[in-house]
Image (tube, rainbow, N blue to C red):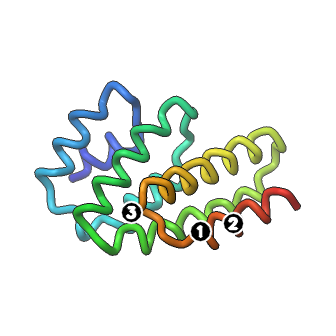
Amino acid sequence: MQKFLTKLRNLKEDSKESLLEEMNSLNLSRYITEMIEIIAEAKLQLRDLGIVIDVCIAMHRRYKDFALQLVPGLHKQFQVCAGCGDETAKAMKRRQILKLLTELYLKGVVNDIVKVGKCLKELVR
């Protein structure tokens, strides 16, 4: 299990297939909260966002509570970013979270557009 969580922390496009295969072979129901924390706190490049979206979609298909816990976790991290020191780093992290939330909404994982709108509202303040 720790091996899987380590792979999740180090998300890269080239490890996508093995990560998704391993995810399908494991029972991750006890680790949903930890996985959400890893996803929300990950320092991703925008080019790696596609794999995060694929992982979230796969988790949502297997565990119905995943999306219900994911949105508050991402929103919390979005708010925590307000305390980040560097303005550029703060803007990049918030942009990643907003893009992730928007993509998950468009893919049908997130059903509540209000949460995405809340993040947008906070971003333009």
Instruction: Identify whether 85 is placed above or below 113.
Output: above
Q: Residue furthest top?
A: 14
Amino acid at dot 1? Ile
- Residue type (three-letter) at the residue carrying disc 2: Gly
Q: Earlier in the sequence, mark 3 or mark 2?
A: 3
Which of the marked residues, 1 or 3, is nearer the chain's N terminus?
3
How many numbered callouts?
Answer: 3
Q: Is residue 76 visible?
A: no
Cα gap from disc 1 to disc 2, whole angstroms: 6 Å
Label 3 environment density (alpha carbons within 10 Å; few <14, some 14–19, many ≥20)? few
Does residue 109 appear in the picture of this structure?
Answer: yes
Residues at discs 1 and 3 in contact (Cβ within 8 Å) = no
Would you name the residue on which mark 1 appears? 113
In the foreground, 87 or 68? 68
For the residue pair 20 and 30, the one nearer the viewer reads as 20
Tag 3: amino acid: Glu
Tell me the element at label 2.
helix
User: Quick one: quadrant of the C terminus?
Assistant: bottom right
Point out the residue furthest to the right here: 125
Could you say which disc has been placed on residue 117 in the image?
A: 2
Residue drawn at the location 28% of the way across and 53% of the way down: 58
Residue 41 in picture, x, y percent from top left: 54, 52
At horizontal 23% and vertical 69% (from top left) the residue drawn is 29
Residue 75 lies, in percent from the top left, at: 61, 66
Q: Describe the element under mark 1 as helix, strand or loop.
A: helix
Foreground label between 3 and 2: 2
For this rendering, which residue is in front, 116 or 24?
Answer: 116
Image coords of residue 53 (percent x, y): 42, 47
